[in-house]
Image: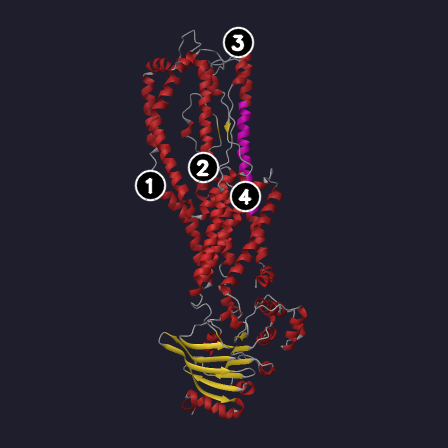
Amino acid sequence: MITTDKLTKKFGDFTAVDNLDLSVKEGEILCLLGANGAGKSTTINMLLGFIKPTSGTAKINGLDVIKNNLKTKESITYIPENLMLYPSLTALENLDYFAGIAGKELSPQMLTDFLKEAGLQEEAFQKRISTFSKGMRQKVGIALALAKDTKVLLLDEPTSGLDPKASNEFGALLQKLKKKGVAILMATHDLFRAKEVATHIGIMKDGKLRQQFVAENISLSELETAYLDTMNYKEALS
Amino acid sequence: MLRYNFKYELRLLLRSRWIQILSLILLVLFGFSTFNGIEKVEKRKNDILTAKQQVKESDAAMLKLLDSVERGLEVSASPWTIPTNPMNVGNHHPRVAAMEPQPMAFVSTGQADLFTHYIKPTVSGDDFALNFTEMTSPVQLLFGSFDLAFVIVYLLPLLIIAFTYNVLSAEKEQGSLRLLASQPISIRKWVFQKLILRFFWLSVLVILSLLVVFFLIGVEPLEWTSTLSLLGLTICYMLFWFALAFLVNLFVGSSAKNAVSLIMLWVIFVLLAPSVLNQLGNTLYPMPSRTLMINEMREHKAEVTKRQDEILDNFLRDHPEYAINDTTQSRNFYHSYMASQKVVKEALEPIVSSYELQLHKQQEWSKKLQWLSPAIVAQESLNQLAGTSTADYEDYRDQVIGFAETWREHLMAYLYNNKPFGQQDYSSLPNFQFSYASNTTMGVSALVLLLVAGALLVFGFAVQGKSQKRGLLSN
């Protein structure tokens, strides 16, 4: 579903993403770990067509994201670190608007069902987004993914700043989507959450994918060690 | 996408109180400016009415005096005022040559604060054509009139700028642009739809506010075709500013830069362009000195006064038709004076013509280049609609000059035939009737504004593709 082939992005002399080869299939969750500036967000920006790659290709469902930008976005839902919806619209109205402009015409009942499925409490449906916490806004984002019948979910630091309960709930929602066959790529700093939800984990540094694991084959402590090794943090910590 | 943008744009505008604020501002601006315009028109009408009333009273006194003279009664009137002398009628009982305001005159003061709108041409007065300007406060001339045209041409674009400058940049600054851009939509089309919807709602507000104000203030008679022309031109002018906002939203970037760019464009189109065109017109076609012209006129007068008798003889030889029924051959001051006036006028004709020609060239030049600024196009069209354009005043002046000639000719026939003026002659005195010839180019102006706006929008769609990636969506 998500594939990149030697995907590279340079900003002048600085290489943000360097010959990145990725593949995330249906029902898989790939968590990309890495420090700030490792190239995780740039990769997601290229998958969305926000940034043009310097070389290489990025594909969604086999379609090049630059050549078929609008077509590929039909099957993508993107949830950034701070999902900013329209604060003066309610949760239902935001969902109706974003699903609507994406071409999904939904009945009020369907909108309600999607918000429920995303775990938002019913009393919040008619409340303006300006009163929502970050976790509640992320749930509206998940509802949008459900409403769009999304095939690819791109998440950029979605759990940063969430309390453990909200983060846990968000993880559970990702598992739900995974079971529906959604291919999920999540950029995160949260090793624990990555180990919890991912089927595959990659560690990026300086734009390169340095290590990749099948999540069930590695323990949290092994992951932590591998991460610190990759980042050359051991010396700094010792 | 349009359906959902339409559905939610109004909600967003209502909840952010834009619609309420704009409605209030428009009502206040339109209300005050319309009231102002109507006050000016009323003053103009009252001035004309007062002048006509004065003429009526003066005529009544004249007829009473003539009646007394004709009945052989003794009257106490000096030889310089007694109306049996046709020149006294021509000088002391002139007609009012008034330019009645048009029904939509309240829309735009136009040239009305520069030129007089009524005049009483006399037989021996100076050439009033040179003294056609109104005594007006320089402060008022500096700041212009707060009329409807001022609100539409100058202030409405500022409201549009405030309403549109951050349609796209605000999405970025609030963080919602990334979510929007991740949807299968073209951001260009999205911005276009948002602006077209804002244009639609602002147009609705402008139309409703104007109609409410017209209704409340009681604009009578409300000419519906003129009102529709006014609304049509306003909408086209607004579309031009929305098209500019579309380009700025696509090409510039942050809200602050967008706002500054749009304000700069406002300064260029609304303030600089008219001023530069005016300056260039003056430089290319400099006007002969008015003072020199007046001096030259005085010199000619002084010179002809010295040889009035000779002039009178020549005049009557050249124009025997004036004295065709004269049996007395009696001559007095007025015979010489009127003849010399004719000579002065003929002698000054080339100077006056050169002045007129330069003025005409300046105006033609400005007319050709007015298309460079939509603000000039809109202002000129509103002046035409109100009947206060330069062309309207020139037309009026020509009619007054024609009438003055008729007035003079009519009474000169009495003078040179030495025929006294009597009661029975009163009804045949010529009267001035201003005939308004609509010279509006409003249809063309609206079309040009539409074409310019259309071209800007097409340009935005054609060129924006490359610039879209210039950082709007990157962190």
Q: Whole-Å distance between the Cαs marked 2 and 3? A: 50 Å
Q: Quadrant of residue A114?
A: bottom right
Q: Which of the two labelled residues, at mark 3 and mark 4, occupies the earlier sequence position?
A: 3
> Residue under mark 2: which chain is it in?
B
Q: Whole-Å distance between the Cαs marked 1 and 2? A: 20 Å
Residue drawn where x is 58% and y is 49% of the image: B207
> Dot 3: few (<14), some (14–19), or many (≥20) neighbours within 10 Å?
few
> Residue under mark 3: which chain is it in?
B
Residue B232 lies in the magenta stretch: no
Q: Which of the two labelled residues, at mark 2 and mark 3, occupies the earlier sequence position?
A: 3
Residue range (magenta): B30-55
The way the protein has been coloured in the rendering is secondary structure
Q: Whole-Å distance between the Cαs marked 1 and 4? A: 34 Å
Question: Could you tell me residue A149's position as x and y percent?
Answer: 59, 75
Q: Would you say the residues marked 3 and 4 are in contact, meaning their CB atoms lie under 8 Å apart?
A: no
Q: Quadrant of residue A158?
A: bottom right
Q: Whole-Å distance between the Cαs marked 3 and 4? A: 61 Å
Specify the label residue B101 is tagged with: none
Which residue carries the number 2 mark? B390
> Residue under mark 4: which chain is it in?
B
| Vertical relation: B157 (above or below) A121 | above
| Vertical relation: A168 (above or below) B201 | below
Which residue carries the number 1 mark? B284
Q: How many marks?
A: 4
Identity of the amino acid at label 1?
A: Leu
Give the label, 2 or 4, closer to the camera.
4
Instruction: Tell me the SS state at disc 3.
Output: loop
Question: Could you tell me residue B416's position as x and y percent?
Answer: 42, 13
Which residue carries the number 3 mark? B74
Question: Could you tell me residue B190's position as x and y percent?
Answer: 52, 63
